[in-house]
Image: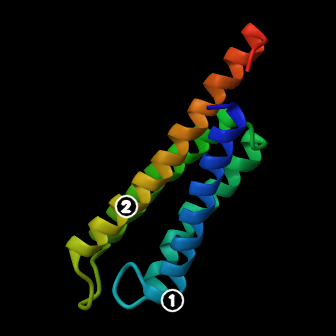
Amino acid sequence: MKTTTYYVLALGVAVATVLFLVLAIGALGIIGDGGRPDRIYATVLAVLVLGSVIARLRPAGMALALLATALTQILVTVVALLAGLPDDASVIDVVGITAMYAALFGLSAWLFRRAAAHHSAVAVNGRG
């Protein structure tokens, strides 16, 4: 595959994951029925935005930004679990949802890494 294909796939996975996360935070709820406890997941979005700005949307930097985002997703859930969940929340559901989001952010990071590796190979070899 070409560098642009990996990059577009990575960007598509990242954007779709962010949209699903925003929907989960705002309407569905990750921790319980939604609302105030779910706002802690805005930290994940902040890490992604900050990482993307620092990376200037370059593939190698975006791979690191998405990896940091996946780790932040896990860390935020650990903090939420240690703080205690509302009565209507299931630990299994929260951990499962977290694993899904972390895996999707991780997939995007891997695709960005592939785009970066392919891009550097093109720069060295001069062939796409």
Q: Nearer the viewer, residue 58 or 35?
A: 58
Quarter location, residue 82 = bottom left
Q: Amino acid at mark 2?
A: Met
Q: CA distance from mark 1 to mark 2?
A: 18 Å
Question: Residue 44 shows which numbered tag?
Answer: none
Q: Quadrant of residue 54?
A: top right
- Is residue 19 toward the left or the right of residue 33 in the image? right
Residue, x 55% and y 39% (percent of image)? Answer: 111
- Residue 9, x across and y down, in percent: 61, 48
- Numbered mark located on residue 27 in the image: 1
Query: Where's the N terminus, which quadrant?
Result: top right
Q: Position of residue 90 (x, y in %)?
A: 22, 80
Dot label at residue 100: 2
In this view, the residue in front, 24 or 54, is 24
Left or right, 18 with reference to 53: left
First in sequence: mark 1 vs mark 2: 1
Which quadrant is the C terminus positioned in?
Answer: top right
Number of other residues with Cα within 10 Å of mark 1, as a class: few under 14, some 14 to 19, many 20 or more: few
- Picture coordinates of residue 109, whole percent (x, y): 54, 42
Residue at the spot 60% in from the left edge and 47% down from the top edge? 10
Tell me: 88 left or right of 124: left
| Amino acid beneath label 1 | Ala
Viewed as shown, does residue 53 lie left or right of 70?
right
